[in-house]
Amino acid sequence: RLLLVVLGAGVVVGLGLLIGFVVRRTSRFLRAVSRTMQNIVQHSDLNRRIPVEGPAEFQNLARSINDTLERLAASTASQEELAEIELKQSTMISNISDVIGIIGMDGMMKYKSPNVEKSFGWQPQDLIGTDGWLTVHPDDLERIQKIFYTLLEKDNASATVEYRYKCKDGSYKPIALTGTNLTNNPAIAGILLNYHDITESRQAEANLLLANAQAEAASI
C-alpha cells in the first residue's frame, strides 16, 4: 500500500509538472500573440511577426497569423502606392492648362479634372452627375450637340470645336474643345474632352484685325 501511495504521489507530481510546462508554453505563446496585436494596433506596424516555436499546433497557428499579417502588409503597401500615384496624377492635372472631362453617351458628366475651378470657377463635384449641356451657351447648343452625336457614330472619332462655356458666376468664356469617342474603352466609357479658355487668343486676334484696319485706313 505504501508503494502505491508513493507511485500515486509521483504521478501527481509528474502531471503537475507537465501541466505547468504546458501552461507556461501556452502563456508564452499567448503573450507573444498579444504583444504582436498590441504593436499593430498602437503603431500600425504590420511587419511584426509571432515567433514560430513550441508545439506543432502553436507553430501552425503562428505561421497562419504571420501569413495573414504579410498579406495585410502587402495590401496596405499597394493601397499606399495607389494613393500616392493618384495624388501625383491629381497634382499634375491641376497644373496643366487643359481641363479634362468625360461625358457619357446620355450627356451626363462623368468626370471633371480639378483645374476646372482655376479657369471657370466650378469644382468637379459641381458638374459630375449633371447634364453636360448646361455649360453650353444656348445659341451654341444645337451645333455642339450635332457634333456630339456624330462622334458617337464611330469609335475613336475626334473633333475640335469652339463655343461659349458657362462659368460658375454665370458669365461665358470662349473655349476650344477636342472630343474623342472612347465609349469602347471601359476605363472611359464616354467622350473624352480636353478644353481650355481661348479668351486671350480671341482678344489678340481682335487687336490684330483692328490694327490692320487702322493701318489700311491711314494709308488711304
Image (spheres, grey):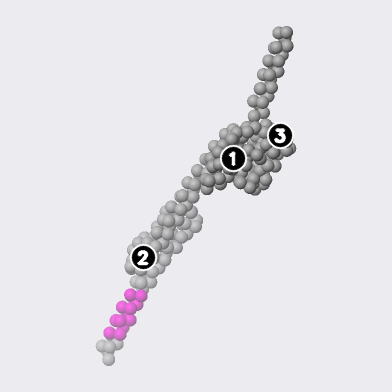
* Residue type, numbered disc 3: Tyr
Query: To which residue does mark 1 refer?
Result: 151
Please state if 30 lies on the left or on the right of 190 as rendered.
left
Give the CA distance from mark 2 to mark 1. 61 Å
Q: Which residue occupies the foreground of this view, 139 or 59?
A: 139
For badge 1, the amino acid type reads Leu
- Callout in the foreground (3, 1): 1
Disc 2 vs disc 3: which is toward the camera?
3
Name the residue carrying label 3: 172
Residues under labels 3 and 1: Cα distance? Answer: 25 Å
Give me the residue at 67% from left, 33% from top.
163
Q: Which residues are magenta?
A: 7-19
For label 1, the crowd category at 10 Å Cα-Cα, with few meaning under 14, some 14 to 19 and many 20 or more, is some
Residue 216 seen in the current view: yes
Numbered badge on residue 60:
2
> Is 103 placed above or below 172 here?
below
Is 9 magenta? The answer is yes
Q: Nearer the viewer, residue 215 or 26?
A: 215
Query: Is the residue 27 above or below the residue 153 in the image?
Result: below
Percent x, y for residue 133?
68, 42
Q: Position of residue 146 (x, y in %)?
A: 65, 39
When asked about the image quadrant of residue 72, the answer is bottom left
Q: Quadrant of residue 140?
A: top right
Q: In terms of image quadrants, where is residue 209?
A: top right
Which element type, helix, strand or loop, lies under badge 3?
A: strand
Is residue 76 left or right of 93 when viewed as pictured? left
Q: Is residue 38 above or below residue 19?
A: above
Q: In the structure shown, which secondary structural element does the residue marked by tag 1 occupy? A: helix
